[in-house]
């Protein structure tokens, strides 16, 4: 009979691993704009457990009060603008097609109007590298280049909080509360360290077992952990490895 693995329990719909969204401040989105840019004033900069970077509360002239990811150099009381012809300045929001090559952007929309999907973590940014007709090529934080529609919006600058990881955790308890704030599974225990009833690799009171971690294609669901029906494992034969 198959075992109920810890990585399977996350999808059962129970409350154990549900995101604590009731503690999140709000959703981050770009404002709805027309042909003319809309000015907005930053009322406050707040912390949200659901985002790694700080959020700025912005009140726009058209009455919208929205949350946006704060950029480096942004402060309370600053006036920013959003729209098609917005000035190329830190914190402003504009269309990718309106920005020159080399501009640093964040919170980039995947589809025009979706509010922003890419480069949202603290300290991240994308860079506009090329324009091809109605498309814009952006280098993402992973250094991968992706093509976007020129009508997609993005904010100018770098997401604040980039030095968040510079502060050492010092002890496991701090990491525990860090993970608990966003309801992440911590600590992650190796399957070989578990009991036999909890994982196919568990039991025998030792970390070093002779059990193969490459289950067969026809293995039962409870045994399909590790390198599932892998074609090959280990170093490739005949391939030189640089030391």
Image (tube, helix red, strand yellow):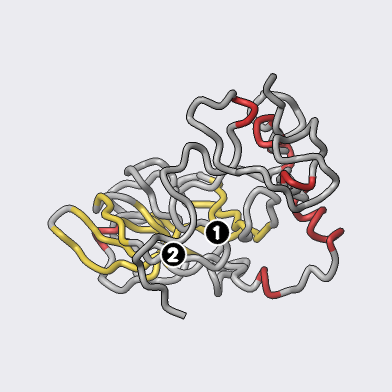
Q: Helix, strand, or loop for circle 1?
A: loop
Q: Is residue 185 left or right of residue 170?
A: left
At mark 2, the secondary structure is: loop
Along the viewing direction, whichever of 50 and 156 lies nearer the viewer: 50
For the residue pair 53 and 43, the one nearer the viewer reads as 53
Q: Position of residue 112 (x, y in %)?
A: 32, 44
Q: Identify the residue at horizontal 85%, vertical 66% (top origin).
A: 171
In contact (CB < 8 Å): disc 2 and disc 1: yes
Question: Which comes sooner in the sequence, label 2 or label 1?
Answer: 1
Q: Quadrant of residue 53?
A: bottom right
Residue name at image x 40 percent, y 71 percent: 89
Left or right relative to 192: residue 63: left
Residue 242 x, y percent position in the rendering? 42, 78
Q: CA distance from mark 2 to mark 1?
A: 10 Å
Query: Where residue 160 sits in the image (x, y, percent)?
Result: 58, 67
Q: Visible in this render: residue 196? A: yes
Quarter holding the N terminus is: top right
In the image, which disc is placed on residue 121?
Answer: 1
Q: Nearer the viewer, residue 77 or 104?
A: 104
Image quadrant in which you'd find residue 54: bottom right
Mark 1, other Cα within 10 Å: few <14 / some 14–19 / many ≥20: many
Question: Where is mark 2, residue-wise?
Answer: 141
Point 60% across, 44% down: residue: 213
């Amino acid at each position: 009979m198959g075992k109920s693995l810890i990585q399977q329990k996350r999808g059962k719909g129970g409350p154990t691993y549900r995101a604590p969204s009731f503690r999140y401040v709000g959703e981050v989105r770009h404002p709805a704009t027309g042909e003319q840019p809309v000015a907005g004033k930053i009322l406050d900069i707040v912390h949200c457990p659901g985002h790694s970077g700080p959020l700025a509360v912005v009140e726009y002239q058209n009455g919208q009060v929205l949350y946006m990811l704060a950029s480096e150099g942004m402060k309370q009381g600053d006036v920013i603008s959003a729209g098609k012809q917005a000035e190329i300045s830190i914190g402003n929001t504009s269309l990718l097609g309106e920005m020159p090559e080399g501009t640093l952007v964040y919170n980039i929309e995947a589809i025009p109007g979706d509010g922003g999907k890419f480069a949202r973590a603290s300290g991240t940014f994308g860079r506009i590298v090329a324009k091809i007709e109605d498309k814009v090529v952006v280098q993402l934080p992973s250094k991968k280049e992706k093509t976007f529609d020129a009508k997609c919006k993005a904010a100018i600058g770098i997401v604040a909080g980039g030095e968040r990881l510079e502060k050492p955790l010092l002890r496991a308890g701090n990491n525990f509360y860090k993970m608990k704030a966003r309801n992440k599974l911590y600590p992650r225990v190796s399957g070989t360290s578990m009991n036999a009833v909890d994982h196919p690799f568990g039991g025998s009171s030792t970390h070093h077992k002779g059990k193969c971690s490459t289950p067969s294609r026809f293995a039962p669901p409870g045994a399909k952990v590790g390198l599932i029906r892998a074609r090959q494992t280990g170093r490739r034969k005949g391939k030189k490895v640089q030391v």
